[in-house]
Image (cartoon, rainbow, N blue to C red):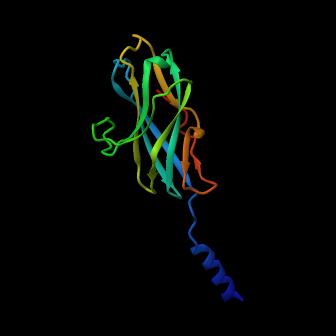
Amino acid sequence: MKAKLAFLLLTFMVVPALAEPNLTISFTNQASTYINSNTSTVVLNLSVNATGNNFNITGLFVTFNGTATFGNISMVAIYNDSNTNAVLDLNEPLLGSNSSLTNHTTLINFTAGINVTLARDTKLLLVIVMNRSATRFINVGLNLSSNNSIIFSGATADSKVLTTNLPMST
């Protein structure tokens, strides 16, 4: 009897614990005080990490704040910062963009999604493009307001975005 109990005890102690699937997103605010018209400017540098499962991010809901009207902003875009230097370089892959800005919250759908794999940080750049005829001396801000701002697939039903770093604002 003691041998069976010892065997069962060892069996359950050896079984590895599975990590709960989580997508953790942290950010660096890179918004400058002034943005020139007709330029692309990185406003948020996102670092995305997966635990417990791979994730495929397929879109982001971005909320605008500040005094700028939608006519001042030509486009909002997400780039994969493949060289992780936090600068929008010419060779950075465009993941998705939205130039039909008519509401305070807009969806940026990723063309093919971005696969976030276990134990690897994925770097993304949230970029705003100001219109050539943008009004001078206005404030432009963007934020990801909650875990519902990130659209993902490929994970299990109990997967979640960790909310410790949200909202993310410029």
Q: Say whether residue 32 is left or right of residue 3.
A: left
- Outermost residue on the front side: it is 100
Of residues 12 and 152, the one drawn nearer to the viewer in this rendering: 152
> Dividing the picture into quarters, in which one does residue 91 lie?
top left
| Residue in the picture at 56% in, 45% down | 162
Q: Say whether residue 128 is left or right of residue 60.
A: left
Q: Does 25 appear above or below 144?
A: below
| Residue in the picture at 65% in, 83% down | 6
Q: Position of residue 122 (x, y in %)?
A: 41, 47
Q: Position of residue 80 (x, y in %)?
A: 38, 43
Q: Position of residue 85 (x, y in %)?
A: 30, 40
- Outermost residue on the left side: it is 90
- Count how many numbered circles sit on residues in the image: 0
Q: Does 145 appear above or below 24?
A: above
> Dividing the picture into quarters, in which one does residue 151 lie?
top right
| Residue in the picture at 54% in, 23% down | 102
Work out which quarter of the rendered image holds the N terminus and state it: bottom right
